[in-house]
Structures are given as structure tokens and as C-alpha cells.
């Protein structure tokens, strides 16, 4: 299978200001793509845009938008329409999670996270897909190894990533004869600001963490090759493989063990 050439194409990346999204933006920039970077943090986006323009001489547009708001996907789409900016590639990277027992959590925070992880991803994909199809482009959705099992203490996050994985696989099948590919990137624990934002700095899964650049490179390479599912890292691949062979109750108990704190 030959790799897709991204040069001189336009990619929209959500959650581009930090972590995996930032590293993906750098990889696309190195291949001379035009970038549209979306996140809540405009100063960080602007700083990244200035750096990529200076290093690679590419076009970069910044859109400040909070995808936890239901109106955000349409607002982004309308801004693209006003600027006459067609999209060749879409990277749905923005996501978050809420840590702790579901019954004790803040309901608004949980619903905002589901809006971000599921509804905005779905809405933005639906809005820009006609452009991507017409230009024989690609979609990369950032899911997680969390998608392969239930996750006590992060129940909604794990469930939302299962949605992203299954949605991506189904969409990949629907689009298989159109020239468009859909890739679900399923990283394991990754060293980003996600741990600080979700208060998961001291849970047991820390020992298998990968760096954001390593994850982004694996996802980018699989994306260019048109793979449907990419799981970076040998340990993550083994864990995903083993989940298929163990009883569901055992898998859930082990998942909880990984999510529990090692110390306060």
C-alpha cells in the first residue's frame, strides 16, 4: 500500500495547541501542508502558527474555538466557508476526560466532555466530509486503547473513546470505494497535559506512558498509509490483543487497577 502524499493539501486539526495535536501539526507542517489549527488557547495556537510559518514557509490559520460548546462545529464550518477554505484532511484530536466515580462527578463537566469527545467530533466530520470526499482526502480520529474495554473511574471517557473507534471503523467501511480513508489512532497513556487537566498524574498506568511525539509519528504514518486502526507501542498492542481473550469482568477489574492512584 503506497503512502498518501499530503504536500500542498489543507488539514484541519482540533486540539492543536498541546500534546498529540501539537506534534501532529508539526509533522504535517514538515510535509508542507497548509494548516488550520483549532483550540481554545489562542495565544498558544498563535505561537505555534508563527513557529511553523517561520520554519516551513507554510500557510497557517488559527481558529479559537471551544469544542465543548454544541455550536462550535457549525461555527468552524461557517468560518471555513466565509474564507473559502476547502479541507483535504481532518484530524479530530480534541478530547478530555473526568476522573473519579461517576456518581460523585460534576454532571455539567461530564456532559461537556461528551460533547467534546463525541458530538463535536461527529458534527465536524459530517460538515466537512463533502469537501474531503470531493478532494479524495483523509480523516484521522484520535481514540484510545481505552476504547477496547470499560474504564471504572473514567467511565464516560472510556465509553466516549469506544464511540470514536467504532464510528471511525464504520465510516471507513462506508467510504472504502470513495478514495477517502478514515483512521482511528488508539494511543495508550501518553505524556501530555491531559494528566494535569484530568487530575490523573498519580495513577498506575503511568509506567507504560509514551511520549506525544512517538504517538503522533505512529498515527501519522498509519494515517498516510490509510490504515483503519493504529495502536502505537508494543505494550499497548499486547494489551489490546489480550482483552479479546479474557472475561469481561476480569478486563474491567484490571482496567480499574490501572486507573487507581498509586498515592494521594
Image (spheres, rainbow, N blue to C red):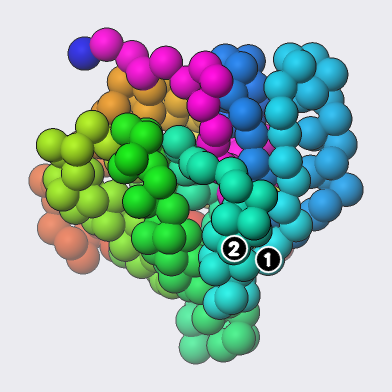
Pointer 2 or 1: first along the chain: 1
Q: Is residue 99 above or below residue 237?
A: below
Q: Is residue 3 magenta?
A: yes
Residue at 23% x, 32% y: name it: 179
**Label 2: how many Cα within 10 Å (few below 14, some 14–19, many 20+):** few
Q: Nearer the viewer, residue 23 or 155?
A: 23
Q: Are marks 2 and 1 in contact (CB under 8 Å)?
A: no
Q: How many marks?
A: 2
Q: Give the SS element for disc 2.
A: helix
Where's the C terminus, which quadrant? bottom right
Find disc 1 in the rendering and name its residue.
66
Q: Can you tell which mark lies on residue 78?
A: 2
Question: Which percent across, then down, holds residue 203?
Answer: 58, 53
Q: Give the SS element for disc 1.
A: loop
Q: Nearer the viewer, residue 263 or 164?
A: 164
Question: Which percent across, then down, holds residue 175?
Answer: 19, 44
Residue at 21% x, 13% y: name it: 1
Question: Which percent across, then down, holds residue 82?
Answer: 64, 56
Q: Is residue 132 magenta?
A: no
Span highlighted in magenta in the image: 2-23
> In screen coordinates, is 141 left or right of 163?
right
> In screen coordinates, is 73 left or right of 130?
right
Question: Which percent across, then down, holds residue 197?
Answer: 70, 59
Q: Is residue 79 above or below residue 222?
A: below
Q: Is residue 259 visible?
A: yes
Amino acid at each position: 500500500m503506497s503512502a498518501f502524499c499530503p504536500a500542498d493539501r489543507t488539514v484541519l486539526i482540533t486540539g492543536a495547541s498541546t500534546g498529540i495535536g501539537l506534534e501532529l501539526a508539526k509533522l504535517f507542517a514538515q510535509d508542507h501542508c497548509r494548516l488550520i489549527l483549532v483550540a481554545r488557547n489562542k495565544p498558544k495556537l498563535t505561537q505555534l502558527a508563527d513557529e511553523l510559518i517561520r520554519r516551513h514557509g507554510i500557510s497557517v490559520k488559527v481558529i479559537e474555538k471551544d469544542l465543548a460548546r454544541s455550536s462550535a462545529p457549525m461555527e468552524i464550518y461557517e468560518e471555513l466557508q466565509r474564507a473559502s477554505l476547502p479541507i483535504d484532511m481532518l484530524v479530530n484530536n480534541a478530547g478530555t476526560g473526568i476522573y473519579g466515580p461517576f456518581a460523585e462527578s460534576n454532571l455539567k463537566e461530564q456532559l461537556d466532555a461528551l460533547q467534546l469527545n463525541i458530538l463535536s467530533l461527529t458534527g465536524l466530520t459530517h460538515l466537512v466530509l463533502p469537501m474531503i470526499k470531493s478532494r479524495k482526502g483523509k480523516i484521522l480520529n484520535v481514540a484510545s486503547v481505552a476504547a477496547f474495554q470499560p474504564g471504572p473511574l473514567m467511565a464516560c471517557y472510556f465509553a466516549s473513546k469506544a464511540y470514536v473507534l467504532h464510528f471511525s471503523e464504520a465510516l471507513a467501511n462506508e467510504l472504502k470505494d470513495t478514495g477517502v480513508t478514515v483512521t482511528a489512532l488508539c494511543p495508550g497513556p501518553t505524556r501530555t497535559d491531559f494528566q494535569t487537566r484530568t487530575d490523573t498524574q498519580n495513577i498506575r498506568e503511568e509506567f507504560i506512558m509514551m511520549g506525544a511525539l512517538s504517538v503522533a509519528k505512529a498515527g501519522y504514518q498509519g494515517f498516510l498509509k490509510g490504515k483503519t486502526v493504529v495502536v502505537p507501542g508494543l505494550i499497548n498492542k499486547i494489551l489490546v490483543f489480550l482483552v479479546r481473550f479474557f472475561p469481561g469482568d476480569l478486563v474491567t477489574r484490571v482496567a480499574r487497577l490501572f486507573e487507581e492512584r498509586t498515592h494521594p
